Image (tube, rainbow, N blue to C red):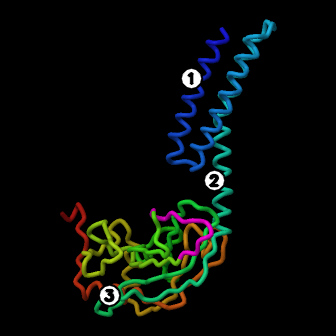
Amino acid sequence: MFLIISIVFTVLQWICAFFLVIVSIHGPSSLPALTLFWLILIQVILWSGFIIFRRSENRYAAIYLFFLGIVTTVSAPLIYFIAEKYDAYRWNNILSNTKIYDVHDNVLLASDGLPFGIRISFKAEFPYTDYNYITPVLRPQSDRYGTSIGPNDMRVLRYSTSPVLKRDYYFRKGVTYDIVFEMVPGYLIPRHNKITLSGNDEQIKYCLQYPVENTHAMTRKMFEHMITADNADNYLVMLHGTAYGDIYSGYSPEFTRNRYNPADFYNTYKIKNFQECQTHQQK
């Protein structure tokens, strides 16, 4: 009886551990490690209970072992809760302790000298040796998209670091990194995904993806106004993965030092004869 109870709960606990690992794919990043620790701990507790209760002369010993199996097994959701809390703590620690300084911005020029996008550079020091998907968001102040991504928001075209990373976005604690992002408006789409840092704008084919007029009328109207208006503006800067400019986490806003006119970028793309992207409906 004691052996059957222990084996049944061992199987159930392994099944719980399996599902916790599956959940971790879209859940807390610390969950797999905590799950392993939890599984080892409860297996030690369960089988220690098996040894103790099997030797006991108490007639309720099997019932006690059964309840021990239940308690250790139903503790699985607690591990998920702990992992969530730990990840939140670690994330807040990264936000508050990642050092960002010497932030500079300037216009990204094509080889013929035309304004093509924005280059932003900065120095960074990280509190952990780990992956940190630091990603800049640049948005014209005159955009009014709330938390949504607008077509004039700048997105990353390519980036470089010094020292060079051995793995993408894997930063080491105690190292000062010089990071450079080259960014273009969100509606400028490379026609292939592979972009090398040595590439220039002539080696990459682009198309223009406008907001769909019949489904995003207001967005399309705002977009058309910004690419035709002569309105240079400081861009709002947020470095996701850090506290720098992260207004959605309650930190102070940050802005580019220089002013940029979204219409200048659009005029460059028209001069270069970039065509509108072909959608499935257009094809």
Number of numbered discs visible in the structure rendering: 3
Residue shown at 57% from the left, 34% from the top? 17
x%, y% of residue 120? 48, 82
Instruction: Answer whether residue 175 is magenta in the image.
Output: yes
Mark 1 lies on residue = 11
> Which disc is residue 110 wearing?
3
Which segment is the magenta one? 167-177
Mark 2 lies on residue = 87
Residue that protrudes farthest toward the left in the picture: 283
CA gap, disc 3 to disc 1? 62 Å
The answer to which of marks 2 and 3 sits earlier in the sequence is 2
Q: Could you classify mark 2 by the number of other residues whose Cα lies within 10 Å: few (under 14), some (14-19), or many (20 or more)?
A: some
Q: Amino acid at mark 2?
A: Asp
Q: Are marks 2 and 1 in contact (CB under 8 Å)?
A: no
Instruction: Answer whether residue 13 is magenta in the image.
Output: no
User: Dot 3 lies on which element?
Assistant: loop
Quadrant containing the C terminus in the rendered view: bottom left
Q: Amino acid at mark 3?
A: Ala
User: Dot 1 lies on which element?
Assistant: helix
